[in-house]
Structures are given as structure tokens and as C-alpha cells.
Amino acid sequence: MTVPGADADRNVLLVLHFGECDERAAAGTRAHVAGCASCREYLATVSAIEQALLAWPDEPAPAGILEGLLARVSRPPARAPAASPPPSALPLLCLLPVMAALVAGIRMLAGRLAALPLWPQLAGSPAADAAIAVGAAAGVALGVGALATLALAPALVLETASLAGLRPRPAASRA
Amino acid sequence: MEEESDQALMAEVARGDAAALRSLYLRYEARTFNLILRLAGNRETARDLVQETFMRVWTMAGTFRGDRGSSFKAWLFTIALNLTRDERSRKRHSARHVGTDEAGELVSPAEGPEAMLARSEAGRRVRAALARLPPYLREVVVLKVYQQLKFREIAEITGAPEGTLKARFHRAVGALREHIAPSGGGRP
């Protein structure tokens, strides 16, 4: 160790000053410091700063902290929100007349379309055959999708309402 | 009667025993308050943060791992340090500098003789010098000089490596030397 300019050297001096090294290492460092004015100077500076800092003595804690703490601790925890009753599926039943009206409307429209005089003229036309096939497929797909949505609707509504009931409430304000 | 260990008290706190929390508070009140006071520079802030620190002890007692060699003191000081950092960050966002607290109000009107003594010229100079230090240097000085912790313990609390902490202490000594101007100091 030469001068306490390098981090490693300063670190050794600091652990010596604060008594954090073992006795053997401390003896070696002390022997060096005895013959090194620079290291002695550094240690004197550390000691002087330490002493100067102690001019700010410990201050007593203000009264009332413990009382406030115990009051907060003894406060009962915020009550869990009351479980909300499961939502009624009654509104979904209102869809039944709508569905019945839709089915009746579709049947009536199909009957009217079938009575149109243009079908014999279109019979045998390749374009008309293709259009009918695509239209029928699209109709079947839409019908299946609509039925599936209607079948799942009650379950989705119930699940959404259940999750909404479990959402945590905002934390109670602190004292 | 033999005094209960910190670990034993913490086990009781984890079971919801407020009396055990009270014992721990009384055991560490002065050290925690002065730690936060010297870091934050303001008694009112320190008062609030001490209460919040022990509130965290209460609510987080189940996470304390005393059986794995963790020191309660290090755990407590880590909570206090983190809360002080959070508060500093919050104040910075609201455009308040910690140095302004230190320069103005330092001791409450209901101060006792010790606090009056702390108003001495030397004490005021020290407070001002500490307030001028960057927080990461102030932390290591306060934990080392006032709390008399080993660098290993400070590393555990701050999360910084020991070598870094020693380098910071050295830098703090250099900065404080300019502001405190001790009589017997040499050149670092």
C-alpha cells in the first residue's frame, strides 16, 4: 500500500478505522500506517469528520407515534363486500318472443320467395345453381352461429356478473 | 426476566399480537426515528414514516424470515430506508427539495432539552452538510456513523455491494470535509 488514492487502499483503511477487519490484517495495516504520512492523514480526516457528525445528537421521537400505530393496528380490517345475489335470467326469457317472431318471419319470407314466378326461368342456369348453393351454405352457417350465441348467452351473462361481484373494492383511506 | 428476542417477538406479531409490536416499537423507536430524521431532514416526515414503517412491520410480519438468519434490525431499516426513498421521490415529483426542510423547520415547538441542544451551531452545520449530500452518500454516512452498522449490514439494507459502499463513504468524507471543515482533518 502506498498512498490512499486507490479504492482498495482506502477500503482497507476504512475497515481498519471501523474495526471491521480481523486482528492479523489490522496489525499489518497498522504497521503500514505507522510509516505512511498519507494514510495517517486520511485516517485523521475520517476521524475528524466522524466526530464532527456526532455534533448532531440523537433526538427524542415525538409523542403520539405509538398511540397512532396501535390505533391503526386495532382497527378491524375492511369488511369483505357482501356477496351479490346471482343475476336473474328473466331478461333472457324476453328474447323468446323475438326469436319466435324471427323464425315466423323467415318462414313467411321463404314461402313468398318460393311462390315467385322467376324460379322456372332460372332453373338449369349454372350461375343460379352456384348462387343458391353458396347462399344456402351461408345461411346454414349464420343460423348455427346465431343459435350457438343464444345458447351461450345466459352462461356468459352469469359469469360476467359473478366476476364483477368479486372485484376488490378501493382500499380504505389511511388515518 | 429474560428479554424476548426480536425473532420471538416477530413470530408473535405475525400471529397478530399487538403487544409484541408495541415491544418491538419501544425497542427500536429511537433508532428508527433518528435514522429517518437524518435521511429525510424533517421531524414531521420522520414521525409519519416511523409510524408507517412499523405499520409495514405489522402487515408484512409473515414475510420476515428470522429463522434463515435475517436480522430484524436490518429488515426494519430496509423498510424505513425504502419508505424514505419513496417519500423523497414523491416530494421530488411535487417539486419540494429535502434541503428546504432541513434549512427551515428542524425541531418541533414542543422540543425538549435534547432537541434544543441539537440546535447548536455545530449541529446545524452538520445537518446542513448532510442535506447537501446526494441521498446515496447520505444513506451510507447515516447508517455507518450514526447507526454504527458494519459495511456488510449496510450492504444488506441498501442492496449495494460493500466495495461500492466504502467508495461512497470515501466520497462523502471528501464532500463533508468541505462543508463541516473539521479542525484536525487532513487531505484524503
Image: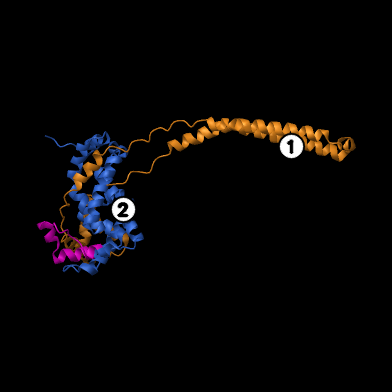
Chain colours: A orange, B blue
Amino acid carrying mark 2 in the image:
Glu
Q: Residue at x 28, y 56 (%)?
A: B139
Q: Residues within 10 Å of mark 1 (few under 14, many from 20)?
A: few
Residue A1 shows up from this direction: no
Which range of residues does the magenta coloring cover? B101-128
Left or right: where A136 falls relative to B36: right
Q: Residue at x 19, y 44 (%)?
A: A67
Q: Chain of mark 2?
A: B
Q: Is residue A112 magenta?
A: no
Q: Quadrant of residue B171?
A: bottom left
Q: Chain of mark 1?
A: A
Check residue B162 in the rendering and tell me which mark sits there, or answer none. 2
Is B73 in front, or is B47? B47
- Residue B104's spot in the image, x, y percent? 21, 65
Residue A129 shows up from this direction: yes
Amino acid carrying mark 1 in the image:
Ala
State the predominant SS element of the stretch in magenta. helix
Q: Are marks 1 and 2 on the same chain?
A: no
Q: Nearer the viewer, mark 1 or mark 2?
A: 1
Left or right: where A37 falls relative to A106: left
**Direction left: furthest residue:** B113
Report how many numbered discs are placed on residues in the image.
2
Gap in angstroms between the C-alphas marked 1 and 2: 73 Å
Q: Quadrant of residue A58?
A: bottom left
Residue A96 against residue A49 in the figure, above or below: above
Check residue B159 in the rendering and tell me which mark sits there, or answer none. none
Q: Which residue is mark 1?
A: A138
